[in-house]
Image (spheres, helix red, strand yellow):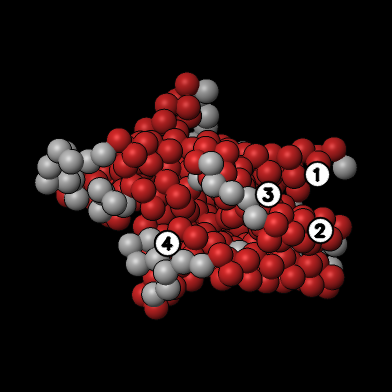
Amino acid sequence: MKSSMDGWGSGLLGVIIFSGSLPATRVAVSDFSPLFLTSARAVIAAVLGAALLLALRQTRPAKRDLMSLAIVAAGVVVGFPLLTALALQHITAAHSIVFVGLLPLATAVFGVLCGGERPKPLFWLFSGAGSATVVGFALAYGGETSLAGDLLMIAAILACGLGYAEGAWLSRTLGGWQVISWALVLSLPLMAVIAIATLPGSWQGIGGPSWLGLAYVSVFSMLVGFVFWYRGLALGGIAGVGQLQLLQPFFGLLLAAVLLGEQISPTMVAATLAVVACVAGARRFAR
């Protein structure tokens, strides 16, 4: 029981950290190309992850784990960051919430396929209701629509859900921060080549917000958040803890209200309470 609660607490902290990812990406792609942003954030995080692995003298993963690490790298190091960066050139961060609302369902499905989890039937009812609430709220919230952007976001959600589930399964043996660190190291050669090839033609004109966006997605979205997230999924269960992602859009809007003075509407409060109820119900029937 304590392990499960620790998992949910760790997962919640990971979600709070991830809540700033899409807004930070949206800001950063105003001055950086999607390819450079994706590769640069991976290189920076990989250097930090490698330093941690060396400093704490972690043993190398077994050969049997390399395929799983490659899937994690393809899903969350390359796939999701690149596809969302490309999508956010066509749609707003607000509109992307529509698709973030589908991520818990995708994670749960891959948890069943990859991790062998078997949630109870009522879990899917609460998970679906929570996703529908987030999607409905996001559609009401507004934002630019684009077929290209929507398709890219769907691909991003599938890649991310697979990367989350595979990484959570691997975390049970390697440890949460070790999984994302090794996945980053594995992707470092390719990402370094891409980063060099896509360097901005001129560094002049790149604003401070874009640099801050790059720093956030590199350190927090790409490394620190995963330390807590994979630990949470491993301890609390992929399908169950994955439902905490339903709260991510509301944390993002809350941050906007606190930092930017944006108003919190009654609709947002009602939607948040509904999502919390769905997450609680999904947690009860996740195992």
Location of mark 4 (residue): 92
Mark sitting on residue 4: 1
Residue 171, located in which quarter of the rendered image?
top right
Image location of residue 135, percent across then percent down: 61, 69
Image location of residue 258, percent across then percent down: 57, 39
Residue type for callout 4: Thr
Q: Earlier in the sequence, mark 3 or mark 2?
A: 3
Q: Earlier in the sequence, mark 2 or mark 1?
A: 1
Q: Of helix, strand and loop, which one carries label 4?
A: loop
Label 4: few (<14), some or many (≥20) within 10 Å?
some
Image location of residue 9, percent across then percent down: 73, 40
Quarter of the image with the N terminus is top right
Compute the Cα span from label 3 to label 2: 20 Å
Q: Earlier in the sequence, mark 3 or mark 4?
A: 4
Image location of residue 60, percent across then percent down: 49, 36
Residue type for callout 2: Ala
Compute the Cα span from label 4 to label 1: 36 Å
Residue type for callout 3: Leu
